[in-house]
Image (tube, grey):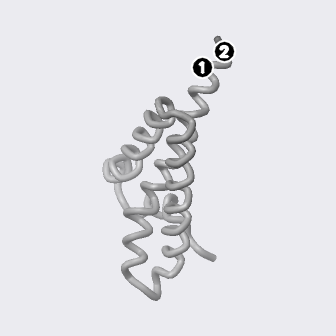
Amino acid sequence: MGSIPFIAIWKGFGLVSNLLIDGIPFLAGLCIGRKAGKKAFKALLIASFVLALLFTVLYQFRLSVHAFDWLGLFAGAPLTYLFFGLIAGRILTNHKEASK
């Protein structure tokens, strides 16, 4: 069974490293998701999803190609957390607008 980079990275590094690698993209996505217009948000959401998916698939071949291991961890995981942050930012914005 394969491994998912945004979960695997938490096993290999300490808390501070993980917060830097994953927390910063999540917070950036959260801020961008709250402030971006519809077209920009949609473009960023699709781009981050496609790139995160691509790096996650490449990460599955990490035993064959060593570079895919590093790409999956240090590009795939932050892109996945950026994607999650974008979604969270948009949910918070929509929730705030709906409660008015």
Q: Nearer the viewer, residue 21 or 38?
A: 38
Classed neighbour count for the residue bearing mark 2: other residues with Cα under 10 Å, few (<14), some (14–19), many (≥20): few
**Residue furthest right in the image:** 98
The numbered dot on residue 39 is none
**Left or right of 60 in this view: 71:** left
Give x and y (percent) for residue 84.
54, 46
Q: Is residue 62 above or below residue 74?
A: below
Q: Which of 41 and 59 is in front in this view?
A: 41
Quarter that holds the N terminus? bottom right
Look at 42% across and 38% down and name the residue there: 27
Residue annotated with mark 2: 99
Q: How many marks?
A: 2
Q: Which amino acid does label 2 sit on?
A: Ser
Q: In this view, does 98 lie above or below 92?
A: above
Q: SS of the residue at dot 2?
A: loop
Give x and y (percent) for residue 67.
37, 79
Quarter of the figure with residue 3: bottom right
Quarter that holds the C terminus? top right
Q: Marks 1 and 2, Cα distance to the nearest angstrom?
A: 5 Å
Q: In this view, does 86 lie above or below 80?
A: above
Classed neighbour count for the residue bearing mark 1: other residues with Cα under 10 Å, few (<14), some (14–19), many (≥20): few
Residue annotated with mark 1: 96
Look at 40% across and 46% down and name the residue there: 25
Proximity of marks 1 and 2: CB atoms separated by less than 8 Å? yes
Give x and y (percent) for residue 40.
50, 41
